[in-house]
């Protein structure tokens, strides 16, 4: 059902925006790519919009949404806390700090880099930033070879504050154009979508998407407690390291191409758990799908609501997410224990 | 066979466990008693492989416990911990099934489902098998955890079961039930070691009692050998009378009032 909803919303999303293309035409144009409907004529302008703008944008939305959704679930599993999300333990802040540094330095140091290299630099930089932040938080919280979740969350808050302050500091070195870029990007946007961004993001998201769903059993065992998980034969530190690397990879790259899009990593796993239960074997793939769906719909809304101008997607996810989240909280107070 | 050989555990300069040696054969129920801070939990953690002793060794089936891989060890021994905190709303049957995780790779087999059904009936958690663990009372949660640990070693020959105060929040009926389950498992060749606080419960079910004081083994023997007013006073510093139940010939003790002068 999720997959069906995803396909429909992806189709709709390709059609809607500053230039409206009917769903039927979208399907025909997509069909042409695999050799179907070759006899039906379509508008060349529409085909161009789809090929150059809409399709990469929708794919980017799907990838980023899936990355944020599944990483949220995985990080919550490792931290054994339904409140944890990549934003909370400093991963997003680390990624955004590096990305801002790159935006500001680009004008002075990195001039002349080709476009595609630029995207990769951004992706790698954000991944590195996310990784460094995660590593610091992880190391601080370790004592006697075990990690303390409370310390980890507090360290995450500290790293967030530090990265936020440094980001603020660096923006003073930015010129007007860069500042606008930074602001827009801090609220999150898929507007930068091109085939190049899609390709640069693809490996960073695909690897976690393929590997994380296989860790459902391990994450379930984790929820019993780290000691209990070890008693069930789990190599606790290996699992923890792998999950942190994969989640960092996905979130870092997603932040690099689309900025900070809040709420998906927190909201998606919660919603999924309330609907299908908490078994991570199902929650992991479902939250990738639901994250992709949420983001596609949000992106569609932010394109059409005051077209031809676009809203930052972070505004929409927060506007949509918060009421839904609060509704779930109030409705299912008893099911949620934090 | 489990052999603990002169186990010592030091934290900083303080020795929490000092030079404790004992062994246990398949079919034995060994109960560890002692005052708070006597080193019971630390000893149990060394037996389970969670903590490495500062000196001394633990051997399970002739192989040192820290030379087992975690996954192999999980197929030989189960541990019921004193504290179990779960924040996610797993159902009872999902949690019990986690006990079978070491036995299957991706999906549970028919045998796994059969075993969790058996242990859930045995521990009396079957009635709320599909309820969220978070909605259960403390005692019910403890029984679910027991079911999970039993599921882990149910079909393992000569398995080792370690329990740290398994009856702490149980009502009278399930206190008896838990020890009766432990006893039944020993009949099937299990080795069961459990920390208990209730001396009468220990005397009722234990094959052997191990009394710890200040990290040292103070007494080790059958309840009849170990339980006397004098020994209890030495280890717990309370006065008591020890009697023999004329019907079962087992010892039981009645503590005397403690006088507090202000």
Image (cartoon, rainbow, N blue to C red):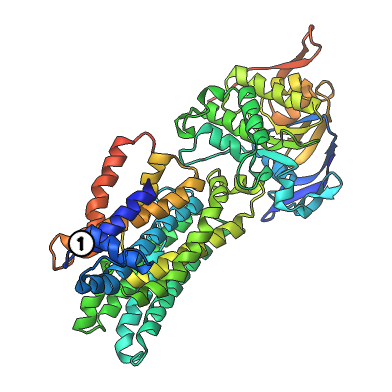
User: On the image, numbered disc 1 is attached to which residue?
Assistant: A16
Q: Residue furthest front?
A: A39
Q: Residue furthest top?
A: B247
Callout 1: SS? loop
Q: Is residue B37 above or below residue A177?
A: above
Q: Nearer the viewer, residue B68 or A6?
A: A6
| Left or right of residue A130, residue A190 in this image | left
| Left or right of residue A19, residue B126 in this image | right
Q: In the image, residue A226 lies at what x, y percent?
A: 58, 49
Which residue is found at the position 25% from the left and 50% from the top? A322
Output the chain of dot 1. Answer: A
Say few, some or many: other residues with alpha carbon within 10 Å of mark 1 (under 14 / 14 to 19 / 20 or more): some
Residue B1 visible, this angle: yes
Q: Nearer the viewer, residue A158 or A313?
A: A313
Q: In the image, residue B124 lies at what x, y percent?
A: 59, 22
Q: In the image, residue B207 lies at what x, y percent?
A: 81, 25
Task: Residue A163: name its quadrant.
Answer: bottom left
């Amino acid at each position: 059902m999720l997959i069906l909803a995803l396909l429909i919303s992806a189709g709709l999303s390709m059609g809607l925006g500053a230039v409206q293309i009917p769903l039927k035409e979208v399907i025909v144009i997509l069909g042409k790519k695999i050799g179907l409907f070759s006899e039906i004529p379509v508008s060349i302008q529409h085909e161009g919009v789809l090929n150059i703008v809409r399709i990469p944008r929708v794919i980017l939305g799907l990838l980023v949404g899936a990355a944020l959704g599944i990483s949220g679930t995985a990080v919550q599993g490792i931290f054994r806390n339904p409140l944890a999300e990549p934003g909370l333990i400093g991963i997003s802040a680390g990624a955004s700090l590096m990305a801002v540094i790159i935006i500001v330095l680009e004008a002075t140091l990195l001039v002349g880099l080709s476009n595609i290299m630029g995207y990769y630099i951004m992706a790698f930089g954000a991944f590195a930033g996310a990784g460094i932040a995660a590593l610091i938080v992880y190391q601080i919280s370790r004592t006697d070879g075990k990690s303390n979740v409370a310390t980890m969350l507090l360290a995450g808050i500290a790293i967030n504050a530090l990265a936020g302050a440094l980001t603020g500091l660096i923006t003073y070195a930015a010129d007007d154009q860069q500042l606008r870029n930074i602001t827009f990007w801090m609220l999150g946007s898929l507007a930068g979508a091109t085939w190049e961004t899609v390709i640069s993001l693809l490996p960073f998201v695909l690897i976690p998407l393929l590997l994380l769903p296989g860790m459902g059993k391990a994450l379930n065992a984790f929820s019993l407690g780290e000691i209990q998980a070890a008693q069930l034969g789990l190599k606790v530190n290996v699992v923890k390291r792998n999950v942190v690397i994969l989640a960092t990879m996905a979130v870092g790259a997603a932040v690099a191409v689309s900025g900070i899009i809040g709420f998906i990593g927190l909201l998606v796993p919660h919603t999924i758990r309330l609907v299908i239960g908490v078994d991570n074997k199902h929650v992991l793939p479902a939250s990738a799908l639901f994250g992709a769906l949420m983001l596609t719909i949000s992106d569609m809304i932010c394109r059409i609501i005051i077209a031809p101008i676009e809203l930052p997607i972070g505004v929409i996810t927060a506007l949509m997410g918060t009421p839904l989240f609060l509704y779930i909280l109030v409705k299912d107070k008893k099911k949620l224990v934090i | 066979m489990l052999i603990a050989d002169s186990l010592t555990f030091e934290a900083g300069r303080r020795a929490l466990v000092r030079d404790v040696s004992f062994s246990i054969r398949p079919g034995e129920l060994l109960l560890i008693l002692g005052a708070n801070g006597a080193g019971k939990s630390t000893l149990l953690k060394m037996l389970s492989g969670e903590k490495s002793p500062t000196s001394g060794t633990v051997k399970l089936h002739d192989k040192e416990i820290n030379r087992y891989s975690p996954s192999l060890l999980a197929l030989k021994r189960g541990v019921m911990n004193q504290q179990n905190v779960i924040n996610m709303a797993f159902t009872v049957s999902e949690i019990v099934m986690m006990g079978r995780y070491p036995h299957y790779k991706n999906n549970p087999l028919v045998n796994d489902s059969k075993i969790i059904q058996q242990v859930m009936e045995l521990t009396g958690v079957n009635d709320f098998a599909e309820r969220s663990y978070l909605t259960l009372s403390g005692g019910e949660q403890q029984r679910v955890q027991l079911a999970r640990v039993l599921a882990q070693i149910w079909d393992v020959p000569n398995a080792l079961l370690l329990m740290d105060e398994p009856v702490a929040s149980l009502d009278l009926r399930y206190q008896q039930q838990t020890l009766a389950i432990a006893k039944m498992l020993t009949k099937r060749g299990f080795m069961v070691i459990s920390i208990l606080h209730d001396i009468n419960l220990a005397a009722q079910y234990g094959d052997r009692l191990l009394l710890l004081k200040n990290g040292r083994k103070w007494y080790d023997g059958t309840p009849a050998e170990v339980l006397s007013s004098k020994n209890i006073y030495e280890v717990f510093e309370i006065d008591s009378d020890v009697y023999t139940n004329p019907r079962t010939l087992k010892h039981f003790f009645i503590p005397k009032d403690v006088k507090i002068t202000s």
